[in-house]
Amino acid sequence: MSDLQDKAAVPAPIKTPCIKVCVVDGESGLCLGCYRKLSEVAGWARFTDAERDEILAALPGRRSLIRPEKLALF
């Protein structure tokens, strides 16, 4: 197999906001590390790039849905 074929067989890495702090806040339903919903975390690999980009764009605004004292823990 040529080097070109080897590289073509390796899928591109998936963009992810995960910072390995996987704690779901029961109040907001969001992960305290990345601000995704549990369903988004679970389905991340199956989403299209466009779906992931849409979620990624929404994450900064979600931070305000979590009480600051909870975020201070991480």
Image: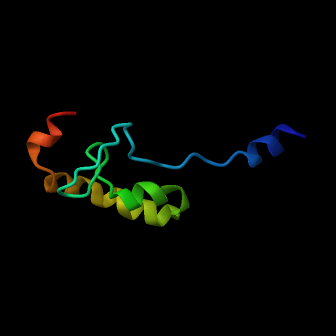
Q: Residue at x 29, y 60 (%)?
A: 58
Q: Residue at x 15, y 51 (%)?
A: 66
**Which of 29 and 7 lies nearest the eye of the viewer?**
29
> What x and y, as percent, mark residue 4?
81, 43
Above-or-below relation of 10 to 27: above
Q: Indicate how the structure is coloured in the image.
A: rainbow
> What x and y, as percent, mark residue 43?
48, 60
Q: Residue at x 90, y 40 (%)?
A: 1
Question: Quadrant of the image for the C terminus?
Answer: top left
Above-or-below relation of 67 to 21: below
> What x and y, as percent, mark residue 55?
36, 61
Q: Residue at x 53, y 56 (%)?
A: 45
**Which of 52 and 34 lies nearest the eye of the viewer?**
34
Judged left or right of residue 12, residue 14 is left
- Image quadrant where residue 26 sits: bottom left
Judged left or right of residue 56, residue 28 is left
Judged left or right of residue 65, residue 29 is right
> What x and y, as percent, mark residue 25?
23, 50
Q: Residue furthest front?
A: 26
